[in-house]
Amino acid sequence: GDSVTQMEGPVTLSEEAFLTINCTYTATGYPSLFWYVQYPGEGLQLLLKATKADDKGSNKGFEATYRKETTSFHLEKGSVQVSDSAVYFCALSDGGAQKLVFGQGTRLTINP
Amino acid sequence: GAVVSQHPSWVICKSGTSVKIECRSLDFQATTMFWYRQFPKQSLMLMATSNEGSKATYEQGVEKDKFLINHASLTLSTLTVTSAHPEDSSFYICSARLGRRNTEAFFGQGTRLTVV
């Protein structure tokens, strides 16, 4: 079945550091790919998405490019802030089924 | 964006009792809602897909008689944990989509269930 694998956390960085959180997937069809963020005590929020190969999703300084050849959707940000501290989930959706398949999540902590 | 509200945010119950969790789409109609379970420091595991007016579709390994799902209207789905035990303690999250095929999913804030 479809699956998503994220780099293990936790990840701790200093403010203004460069961030990469790796995400790879396996899917039988042509899924859409998502990054969700969960801030402490809150529900999940969509951070960005890409629906086809070579698409780049971007939001709040975060970017991720849908790489079909490497089945990856790595999340990047050039300069992180303390407010970016959260848990980040990579996910895919097989359009026909509508349901989301999540990676295990990566806890990110940014120190001032 | 669209709002999905869960109630309660947290609940503590005694072993053997049943607990009902509500998931409402506040400003849109959701023919399909999804129920997830999140263990501490782990990912979200899909439990079931709730379909308005029909039976829920459960994922493999999820006991449908223990986790009763009712989707009686286009804005409300409920999850009832029956005869709860301490191992059912977890964070339960619902979500709903605005439309079909790869549209954004909106999540409730989750319900922390503790069974004592």
Image (cartoon, helix red, strand yellow):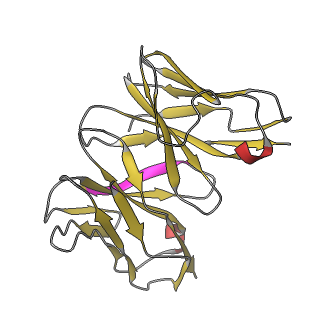
Residue found at x 52% / y 86%: A14
Q: A2 left or right of A106?
A: left
Answer whether residue A44 is magenta in the image. Answer: yes
Q: Which of B105 and A112 is in front in this view?
A: B105
Residue B101 at x, y = what percent? 23, 38
| As drawn, A53 above or below B100 | below
Region rendered in magenta: A43-49
Residue A72: name its quadrant: bottom left
Residue B65: name its quadrant: top right
**Quarter placement of the N terminus of chain B:** top left
| As drawn, B95 above or below A32 | above
Q: Nearer the viewer, residue A104 or B29?
A: A104
Q: Which of A88 and B115 is in front in this view?
A: B115
Answer whether residue A22 is magenta in the image. Answer: no
| As drawn, A48 above or below B33 | below
Residue A52 at x, y = what percent? 15, 56
Q: Nearer the viewer, residue A112 or B80?
A: B80
Residue found at x 54% / y 43%: B61
Q: B112 left or right of A13?
A: right
**Quarter placement of the C terminus of chain B:** top right
